[in-house]
Amino acid sequence: MIAQTFQQSKWVFSKGEDLVLFGGATILAICGSFYVESLANYFWMFILFDQPHVFTTYFYTYTSDRFSTKFKTPLILLPIVCFLLSLLMWKGVSDDFAYAVLSNFSAFHFAKQQSAWFFISSAKEGKSQVAPKFEGYVDKFVIYASVAGPLLLSMTDIIGRSGWRKQGDLIQVPVFFEWPIYIIGVISWIAYLVIQVQKYRTEKKITWGKHFHLVNALFIWSIYRLTMSPQLSIIGQLLIVFGHSFPYIYLGLRYYESRQEKERFWPGIKNLKVMAILVVLAGVFISYMEVLSEAKWYANGIIPCIWLGLIFSHFLIDTFMWKRETHPEGLQFLKDRE
């Protein structure tokens, strides 16, 4: 029976890919933390693992004849507007303020993507005949409680980390939200477990993929946001970086592969392994250039704001690239692989 229910599971990519990609990123982060003495020098971690995924977005958007035509106006305006707004914040307020805005956008962006893996596997599960009609709301509450819950608790400054890039750069959440966050988390988890038990008893159905992404999200965000010991802080930082970057790069590559026969990409490389190497190396190189140029021309603010504009553009492109209503082709290949 367990073997049968395992086959009924719905995963983001597939059982094997999800376990290797997401589970592997978690295991790699834990193991890697024992070789990282501190996060004081984040230079190579930023260049090799953190930032490259940002620039991979541009490989699948601007180099696509179809996508660059369909979204021509936003693709032209976004980097320009984001650069000008970054420069306005930098010159009009301060560089710290510009990076604080980036930190808050980053926190939302990371939390949104982490939740998306759960929602994708949940959508693949389909409608249950025995689950209550409000199961969708329970799913939303339980994943948000598992991801945004630890984030919001840490933003009260009563537990865990007080910032994202550095201490105090996130919006302060009032302390009186602490207990409502706990209560919502407990109730949503109880409701979620009750529904899953009910579905198993009636339909003999266990959605392992969905449960895996929920537990993985809770583990990553709890360790990253709510722990204070030096070793756990290192583990948490690696968990959030690996757990965000690796799946995102892989998602882009699989999307690129699925669109090969439907549109043209520059430079037209068909081999996915070659493309993967090219994209990763290019991302690392651009990240390295970002760090060097920012350090050299930081004072004038223009060069750092160009990079800030590209990062903000990455966040905003993601809001319509992977959204079914605006770009149904984005995640269609995941549905085709069911």
Image (tube, rainbow, N blue to C red):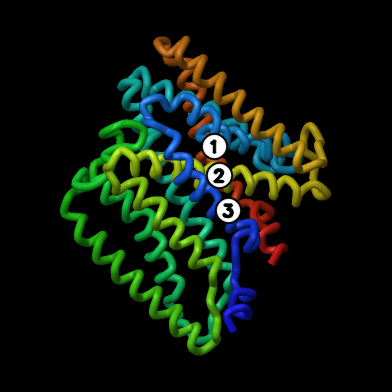
Tally of numbered tags: 3
Question: As rendered, which of 309 and 110 lies closer to the eye?
Answer: 110
Residue 92: % across, % down? 33, 20
SS of the residue under disc 1: helix
Which residue is rendered at x = 72% and y = 45% of the image? 256
Q: Position of residue 327 (x, y in %)?
A: 64, 52
- Can the viewer see residue 150? yes
Q: Is residue 85 in sight in this rendering?
A: no
The label shown at residue 323 is 3
Does residue 89 appear left or right of residue 204 in this picture?
left
Q: Are marks 1 and 3 in contact (CB under 8 Å)?
A: no
Is mark 1 in CB contact (under 8 Å) with mark 2?
A: yes
Badge 2: few (under 14), some or many (20 or more) residues near its Cα, within 10 Å?
few
Q: Which mark is residue 314?
A: 1
Q: State the CA–CA distance, disc 1 to disc 2.
A: 6 Å
Q: Nearer the viewer, residue 274 or 230?
A: 230
Q: Please state if 215 lies on the left or on the right of 125 as rendered.
A: left
Q: Which amino acid is tagged 2? A: Asp
Name the kind of residue labelled 1 in the image. His
**Residue placed under numbered mark 2 in the picture:** 318
Q: Earlier in the sequence, mark 2 or mark 3?
A: 2
Disc assigned to residue 60 = none
| Identity, as a three-letter code, of the amino acid under mark 3 | Lys
Determine the image quadrant of residue 9.
bottom right
Q: Residue furthest left?
A: 176
